[in-house]
Amino acid sequence: MDRRLEGRVALVTGGTSGLGQACADRFRSEGATVVTLDISKGADHVVDVRDEAAVQAAVDAVVAEHGRLDVVVNSAGVPGGGPVHLVALDDFERVIGVNLTGTFLVSKHALRHMLGQRSGSIINIASIEGIEGTEGGSSYNASKGGVVLLTKNMAVDYGAAGIRVNAICPGFIDTPMFRGVMDSEGMTTHKETYRKQHKLQRFGRPDEIAGAAYFLASDDSSFVTGHALVVDGGFTAGMRAGIMEGMGL
Ligand SMILES: NC(=O)c1ccc[n+]([C@@H]2O[C@H](COP(=O)([O-])OP(=O)(O)OC[C@H]3O[C@@H](n4cnc5c(N)ncnc54)[C@H](O)[C@@H]3O)[C@@H](O)[C@H]2O)c1
């Protein structure tokens, strides 16, 4: 098999669960050396992405051990939200802190090494909820919208140094986070509506996001930077009211 990430070193935040874990598995199968960073036990570096000193120490340790850093996937994230008038300030700040500030901090310290190499690929897991509003999205959508624009701005700033920065905007993907939200009280009755908004009529699988991350990590995407790649089974393609069902579609 052609292992196209052979010799590459990848750091994956949120790498012990869901999309991060799927990316780590896919990168390993393509020959990469993968280091995970997560707040949960089982990660190579047990770190809170909001803790700048700990993030810097972990990133520096990866480079000290493996000699370089080629790929970063920022997948650590938390759900949260509600209509704005009901959202507590500390909860808003928690969601922004992990999803946006965490992405900023890990990127910041990875970039220092990538600048020395004059190469690298940063892949930020944003969301379709970072490019459009959804009911009760508030903090989560604000954090992911911030990730999309942080991605584009880093692509502007670091392209001349040979560093590519892209985002992936997944639809709803079956992970522990997804189950935590969709199976919570008040949401289960709406789960079917969300499923049908995906024009492929199903939720996504983590490996389908890992495939997109692999593309962005590999040389197949060598001319792609500043892009927010939607991988959503058609969720954002447009509204479907069911009119075509009468025509057998
Ligand atoms: N599952 C979906 O439907 C979906 C859709 C769009 C975007 N996303 C995004 O994808 C990313 C991964 O989500 P997932 O569905 O795999 O969720 P998940 O809960 O399975 O994984 C998230 C991981 O992030 C880690 N994490 C949480 N807070 C952290 C912190 N402060 N520091 C370090 N690690 C921390 C968790 O321990 C966990 O391992 C998230 O950013 C999420 O917002 C998920």
Image (cartoon, rainbow, N blue to C red):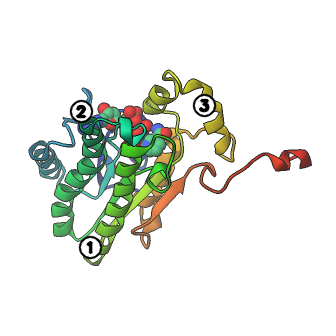
**Residue 46 quadrant:** top left
Residue under the image location 41 percent in, 58 percent down: 167
Check the image and report above or below for 241 versus 222.
above
Read off the residue under disc 3: 190
Residue 202 visible here: no
- Residue most extreme to the top: 185
Residue 48 visible here: yes
Dot 1 beta carbon under 8 Å from ligand 1: no
Q: How many other residues sit within 10 Å of disc 1, few (<14), some (14-19) or many (≥20)?
A: few
Read off the residue under disc 1: 157
Q: Nearer the viewer, mark 2 or mark 3?
A: 3
Q: Alpha carbon of mark 1 to alpha carbon of mark 2: how far?
A: 29 Å
Residue 196: image location, x then y, percent: 68, 40
Closest to the observer, 105 or 159: 105
Residue 130: image location, x then y, percent: 44, 53
In the picture, measured across the screen, residue 231 lies left or right of residue 12, that is: right
Residue under the image location 51 percent in, 46 percent down: 134
Dividing the image into four quarters, tell me where ligand 1 lies. top left
Q: Amino acid at mark 3?
A: His
Q: Secondary structure at mark 3?
A: helix
Closest to the observer, 22 or 225: 225
The answer to which of marks 2 and 3 sits earlier in the sequence is 2
Q: Amino acid at mark 2?
A: Ile
